[in-house]
Image (spheres, grey):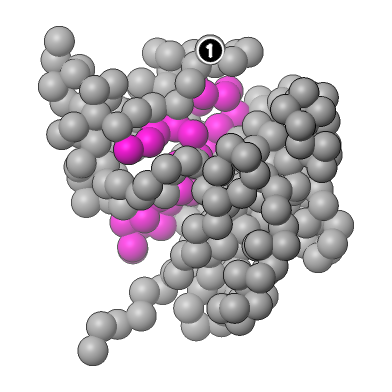
Amino acid sequence: MAQTPPLQVAIIPVTAFEQNCSLVWDSQSKKGAVIDPGGDLDQVEQAAAQYGVTIEKILVTHAHLDHAGAADALHKQLHIPIEGPEREDQFWIDRIEESGRNYGLPHCRKFTPDRWLKDGDTVTIGDQTLDVIHCPGHTPGHVVFYHPGMKLAFVGDVLFQGSIGRTDFPRGNHSDLINAITQKLWPLGSDVTFVPGHGPVSTFGQERQNNSFVGDKALKR
């Protein structure tokens, strides 16, 4: 019989941006975290109830409105801490309410992380530990959450199946993003499965083979 993985994941697309909010929980304790609560918290709560998960914290990869717009609401509703992103994303938090109004997402609220994260930190979900990897480029304070035992990464908008994050936003940097992917993510191994901020799950190996932005063939041109 297949062994239950130490972490389980339910991907919940939220808002008009179809952002992959993830409910992630420790299989043993059923203690969980919500990664990137951009909105539609009723769907997140329904998933938690369905799987019997007790949400204990919020993890934020970066402070764009579709990833962090409902972090404050969930924080206040459940009285749980917010961890992340890296401090360089403060300016995105400062403008999240204005961005929400501009994009028709009036629920977006500023928040103050209970813990800013930096490269080399770890976060916990129940008894499971994930590494924090600072991957700037899409935003300057973007972080990735990585579980080494499961070879599983939550990469926000750094990398997608067949694409990479946009770098034309304020303080975006294309070369920083390429360096983060190739110098920090690829060395983790081609067998790493990743949950992107939008679209289907993929693996680093699949992207190294096929991604026209950061695949091995593309980088040799």
Residue 70 x, y percent position in the rendering:
75, 47
Q: Residue at x 37, y 47 (%)?
A: 200
Instruction: Say which amino acid is labelled 1.
Output: Asp
Q: Secondary structure at mark 1?
A: loop
Q: Residues within 10 Å of mark 1 (few under 14, many from 20)?
A: few
Q: Residue at x 56, y 62 (%)?
A: 23
Q: Which residue is mark 1?
A: 168
Q: Is 26 drawn above or below residue 69 in the view shown?
A: below
Q: How many marks?
A: 1
Q: Is residue 171 left or right of residue 166?
A: right
Q: Is 208 drawn above or below residue 82 in the view shown?
A: above
Q: Is residue 95 left or right of residue 133?
A: right
Residue 85 x, y percent position in the rendering:
63, 39
Quadrant of image for the C terminus? top left
Residue 148 inside the magenta-drawn segment: yes
Q: Is residue 220 left or right of residue 182?
A: left
Residue 181 seen from this side: yes
Residue 120 inside the magenta-drawn segment: no
Image: magenta residue range:
136-161
Q: Residue at x 51, y 24 (%)?
A: 138
Residue 53 x, y percent position in the rendering:
61, 76
Quadrant of image for the N terminus? bottom left
Task: Find the residue positioned furthest to the right.
Answer: 76
Splitting the image into 4 quarters, where does residue 84 fall?
top right
Residue 80 x, y percent position in the rendering:
77, 62
Residue 63 seen from this side: no
Q: Is 151 drawn above or below residue 29 in the view shown?
A: above
Q: Residue at x 36, y 55 (%)?
A: 152
